[in-house]
Image (spheres, helix red, strand yellow):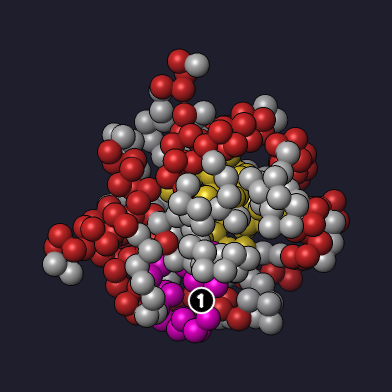
């Protein structure tokens, strides 16, 4: 296994705090705060920011006003501003908002798909065919997220073959990038390697990404395991924003500051300014009145006396 010792030299971090992070906050976060947060993150050097979601405000009240947010942000050249879309209606709004990338989603678990979006995996992916085709025609990148890829709150363990099956369907749709998401944060390094080794047989590892939740404190170990098999794109959320709605009291996405600290220690380039992100994390946590979920961020701010 000596190939595992050569880690990627460069990693792309997809900052998901403004969308995946904030969407679970109970108190509505003002659009101005979201705009300011995205602008700060752009300035810190992220190449890809998940900025908004065009979903029904009935289902995700926090994402109401996504059009206002997309209009209000200062866009940096060469930065991809992504939005989540569930259907054609969402896609039309995304195109009107000039999103650079749309994000579609499907689950690796049949039970989760039924409970989460009231349809089978098969049906959920079929719904995205016209969406992806229209996005392609408009020259917009498409990313697909495979949720519950390392475990499900209803089914428990998920066979990597099931994940591969969904990845194959997303690949057939023509997706540019596919996220392997540990939605409830139950994955461990051995499982992470097994899943990525399986799915990289059908989709290039350079276009796969790891999206880990830190529910059981395994995210950084899981990222390291994914790096060892050649994954070079990871999702994270500033200040660890976003609790997991399916696991009581659980932390959500892995904190960006912690990931940056790990990668910097490994000599892996990200082009993202750790210090700037630590300060942004401290500010947003205060603004929305929640504890800062990043250990590296808190330690850095404490050192500064902030």
Dot 1, how many residues are within 10 Å of its Cα: few (below 14), some (14-19), or many (20+)? some
* Residue at left offset 14%, top offset 63%: 304
Q: Is residue 108 magenta?
A: no
* Number of numbered discs: 1
Q: Position of residue 156 (x, y in %)?
A: 71, 50
Q: Considering only vertical position in the picture, is 111 above or below 25? A: above
Q: Which residues are magenta?
A: 17-42
265 vs 136, left or right, is: left
Q: Considering only vertical position in the picture, is 56 above or below 14? A: below
Foreground residue among 20 and 182: 182
* Residue at left offset 21%, top offset 63%: 301
Q: Is residue 80 visible?
A: no
User: Quadrant location of residue 154?
Assistant: bottom right
Foreground residue among 171 and 70: 171
Q: Is residue 19 magenta?
A: yes
Q: Is residue 157 visible?
A: yes
87 vs 286, left or right, is: right
User: Quadrant location of residue 262?
Assistant: top left
Give the residue pinned by disc 1. 25
Q: Quadrant of the C terminus?
A: bottom left
Main SS of the magenta part reads helix
Farthest residue, direction top: 2
Q: Position of residue 155 (x, y in %)?
A: 75, 52
Secondary structure of the residue carrying tag 1 is loop
* Residue at left offset 57%, top offset 45%: 187
* Residue at left offset 49%, top offset 84%: 27
158 vs 69, left or right, is: right
């Amino acid at each position: 296994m000596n190939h595992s010792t050569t880690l990627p030299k460069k990693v792309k971090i997809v900052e998901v705090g403004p969308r995946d992070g904030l969407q679970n906050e109970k108190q509505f976060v003002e659009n101005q705060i979201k705009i300011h947060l995205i602008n700060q993150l752009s300035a810190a050097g992220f190449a890809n920011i998940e900025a908004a979601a065009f979903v029904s405000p009935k289902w995700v009240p926090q994402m109401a006003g996504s059009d206002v947010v997309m209009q209000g942000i200062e866009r940096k050249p060469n930065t991809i501003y992504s939005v989540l879309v569930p259907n054609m209606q969402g896609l039309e709004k995304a195109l009107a908002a000039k999103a650079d990338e749309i994000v579609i989603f499907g689950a690796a678990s049949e039970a989760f798909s039924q409970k989460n979006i009231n349809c089978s995996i098969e049906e959920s992916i079929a719904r995205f065919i016209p969406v992806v085709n229209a996005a392609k025609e408009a020259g917009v990148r498409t990313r697909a997220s495979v949720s519950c890829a390392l475990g499900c709150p209803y089914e428990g363990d998920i066979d990597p073959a099931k994940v591969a099956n969904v990845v194959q369907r997303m690949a057939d749709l023509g997706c540019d990038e596919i996220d392997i998401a540990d939605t409830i944060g139950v994955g461990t390094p051995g499982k992470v390697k097994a899943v990525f080794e399986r799915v990289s047989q059908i989709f290039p590892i350079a276009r796969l990404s790891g999206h880990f939740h830190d529910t059981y404190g395994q995210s950084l170990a899981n990222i390291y395991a994914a790096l060892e098999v050649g994954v070079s794109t990871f999702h994270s959320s500033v200040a660890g924003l976003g609790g997991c709605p399916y696991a009581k009291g659980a932390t959500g996405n892995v904190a960006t500051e912690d990931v940056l600290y790990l990668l910097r220690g490994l000599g892996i380039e990200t082009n993202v300014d750790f210090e700037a992100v630590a300060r942004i994390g401290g500010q947003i946590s205060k603004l929305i009145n929640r504890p800062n979920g990043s250990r590296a961020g808190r330690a850095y701010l404490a050192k500064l006396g902030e």
